[in-house]
């Protein structure tokens, strides 16, 4: 069976730091095909959800016949790829194409799932119901657990006992996951995630107005990011500057995580239990880091 993936890692990488993850891991399963992800900031203005979805139809003409495809797999919001948020209609169109051909649609919500985007699953933002969802990370709140959830007819197909693993249904991790779900509900962490996103966006839009270095501000709920560029018009990725900013943050007590095909994205994925004061403190450090790169002559922390 074959799988189509819309992960954006096929794009050429400028720096060896984030060399494509697959480098050096051959041999691979041969029947996996990749199509470009819907990355609005890196495509011509006005590129529509239909234009992006056409890549899938084209793949069915050029690369693989749809009747040979078992599933299309996509991250609803790119994680390592740079927190890219596709146009709202993109996944509805992809799923529609899948349905036309009887192909399963699988959402990889390992990074975007369990409250990160202000909803339980990022897929909900796009009005779709995937056939299968893969989750991990936030599901366990730090404990090692992953889950594959899907429609009963799919999940029951292998038959009892035919899926296994050393740590499957590990009791401690399962208890942790149940506690995570309960805590998200009890402490209204979905709303908190949305509020974190709003707080970040307000601040980051200010940075964007001040410095061309901040090319794009994007995200869903608490899963948000800035993409850094050397020039607002050409959008040349500012990878070295991103590294400098991450280092500045580290030296000033804040660990940031960079991402993106071009190593020029700083992603925000703070614990949803962060307080406003803690979050603002982190934002202050990022702002000072941006200032130190965009205006090297200027002194540090400027946010009140
Ligand atoms: C989107 C996405 N899918 C899958 C994985 C791998 O998940 P796991 O570590 O649970 O195998 C990761 C990162 O680890 C990820 O970010």
Image (spheres, rainbow, N blue to C red):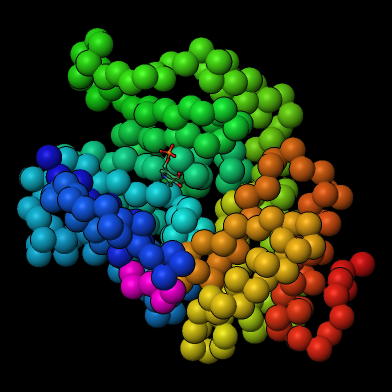
* Most foreground residue, 61 or 97: 61
Q: Quadrant of the N terminus?
A: top left
Q: Is residue 220 left or right of residue 47?
A: right
Residue lying farthest to the right in this orientation: 304
Residue at 52% across, 17% down: 174
Left or right: where does residue 141 sit relative to residue 211? left
Q: Residue at x 79, y 62 (%)?
A: 252
Q: Is residue 170 above or below residue 132?
A: above
The x, y position of residue 173, in whole percent, is: 53, 20
Residue 18's place in the image compared with 100, above or below, is below
In the image, the segment drawn in magenta is: 11-15
Identify which residue is drawn at 56% across, 78% down: 240
Q: Is residue 164 above or below residue 13?
A: above
Percent of width and height locating residue 234 = 49, 88
Q: Visible in this render: residue 46?
A: no
Compared across the picture, whether 109 is left or right of 72 comes to right
């Amino acid at each position: 069976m074959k799988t189509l993936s819309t992960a954006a890692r096929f794009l050429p990488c400028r720096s060896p730091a984030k060399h494509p993850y697959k480098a050096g891991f051959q041999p691979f399963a041969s029947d996996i095909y990749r199509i470009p992800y819907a990355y609005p900031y890196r495509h011509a203005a006005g590129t529509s959800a239909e234009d992006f979805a056409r890549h899938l139809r084209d793949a069915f003409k050029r690369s693989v016949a749809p009747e040979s495809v078992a599933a299309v797999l996509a991250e609803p919001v790119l994680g390592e790829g740079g927190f890219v948020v596709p146009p709202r209609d993109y996944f509805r169109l992809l799923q529609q194409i899948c349905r036309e051909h009887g192909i399963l649609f699988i959402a990889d919500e390992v990074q975007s799932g369990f409250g990160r985007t202000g909803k339980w699953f990022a897929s909900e933002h796009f009005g779709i119901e995937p056939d299968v969802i893969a989750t991990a990370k936030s599901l366990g709140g730090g404990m090692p657990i992953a889950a594959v959830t899907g429609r009963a007819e799919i999940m029951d197909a292998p038959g009892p006992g035919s899926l296994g693993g050393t740590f499957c249904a590990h009791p401690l991790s399962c208890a942790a996951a149940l506690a995570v779900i309960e805590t998200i509900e009890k402490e209204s962490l979905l709303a908190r995630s949305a509020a974190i996103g709003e707080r970040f966006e307000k601040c980051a839009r200010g940075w964007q107005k001040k410095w061309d270095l901040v090319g794009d501000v994007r995200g869903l709920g608490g899963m948000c990011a800035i993409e850094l560029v050397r020039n607002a018009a050409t959008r040349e990725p500012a990878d070295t500057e991103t590294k400098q900013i991450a280092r500045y943050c580290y030296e000033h007590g804040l660990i940031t995580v960079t991402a993106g095909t071009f190593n020029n994205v700083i992603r925000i994925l703070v614990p949803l239990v962060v307080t406003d004061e803690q979050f603002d403190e982190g934002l202050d450090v990022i702002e000072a880091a941006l200032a130190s790169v965009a205006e090297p002559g200027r002194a540090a922390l400027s946010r009140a």
